Amino acid sequence: MADFNFTVDTTPMANQINSVSHHVDGVTASVVAMKTAVISAEKDAANKICGNVNRGFFSMMQAQITQKIAQCTSKVESKLFELQQESQALKSIQTRMQRDYNMISARYFKLFNALNANLKTRIYELDKPTILLATKDMSLKDNRINKMAAFFNTNQTESVLEAQNIGLSKAKKHCADAIEAIGGYLNEMNKQNKHFDSIITNIETDYNSDILLPVIYNEYTTDSGSSSIKTTLPTTGINQIDKSLNGSIDNFVMKSVMNNEEWKDFNQNEYNNIASEFNALVEKSGNDERTKQLMLKLFNESKEMKQPKTV
């Protein structure tokens, strides 16, 4: 069996390992330095990026806000311009309306002053008979009070009998005047009764006769929409005759309504007759010219003139 002996020297290897260790330490120091430099560079880059991002964001927001401010400013200025124009237009309308109001007020002021003066004149004319009657009556009463008093210039005790005789004679004179006035009134009443008896006769007849009476039919519509007819006819003063006439008229109206009879239009001749009669009544009314013109205007503008029905 062979016997081998090997001698291994580790000194070179140890030297090499020692050299490698130095290199490793250098590499480690380099890595640490590089890591520190990389971190510092990354931090600087991150800070720069963040600064750029922040600056860009704020720049963008500032630009957007500036743009919106410009848009809003433009809109506000345009609205202000429109409001100024509308304000000027409203002021112009207000001025025109004020001018029209003053003109209309002045016209109506004159009109109402004229109406007030006209009404004042009418009221004075209406009250004039009453005022004259009252004035006349007051004058009579004053004269009666003054004339019925017995005046005498005696103030002694022995003159009492003369004063009583004077007062008694004054009272007798007034009584005689009152009796004479009453007698005259009764005589006038008897004359009027005889005159009426000679005009009005109460004669009974054995035959029937037709009497024509004017009757006015007014057809109108109530607030509820229903139609109604109102009749107007002269009265005789005798209740029995008036009731009979009203009953006949009401029966005729009911029959006309049940038979659905329609109103007939005036023909031209009837309208001309009514118009001439109405014009004559207006001329004889004694009203002022403005009232007459208004009456004729209302008559001419009437579009519901219908022919009256007869009984």
Image: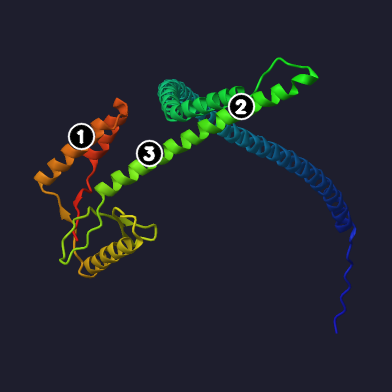
SS category of the residue bearing label 2: helix
State the residue at coordinates (25%, 47%). 198
Q: Along the polypeptide, which appears first: circle 2 or circle 3? A: 2
Query: Distance between the Cα atoms at labels 1 and 2?
Result: 60 Å
Decide: few, some or many residues near mark 1? Use Cα within 10 Å; few <14, some 14-19, many ≥20: few
| Residue 8 x/y as whole percent | 88, 65
The residue under label 1 is which amino acid type? Ala
Q: Which residue is mark 1?
A: 280
Query: Distance between the Cα atoms at labels 3 and 1?
Result: 36 Å
Foreground pick, 168 / 252:
168
| Residue 140 x/y as whole percent | 53, 26
Q: Nearer the viewer, mark 3 or mark 1?
A: 3
State the residue at coordinates (70%, 22%). 162
Tag of residue 303: none
The residue under label 3 is which amino acid type? Glu
Q: Quadrant of the N terminus?
A: bottom right
Q: How many marks?
A: 3
Decide: few, some or many residues near mark 2? Use Cα within 10 Å; few <14, some 14-19, many ≥20: few
Query: Distance between the Cα atoms at labels 2 and 3?
Result: 29 Å
Q: Tell me if 297 is positioned left or right of 121 in this view.
A: left
| Residue 149 x/y as whole percent | 64, 24
Q: Which residue is mark 3?
A: 188
Q: Quadrant of the C terminus?
A: bottom left
Q: Which residue is mark 2?
A: 169
Foreground pick, 78 / 261:
261
SS category of the residue bearing label 1: helix
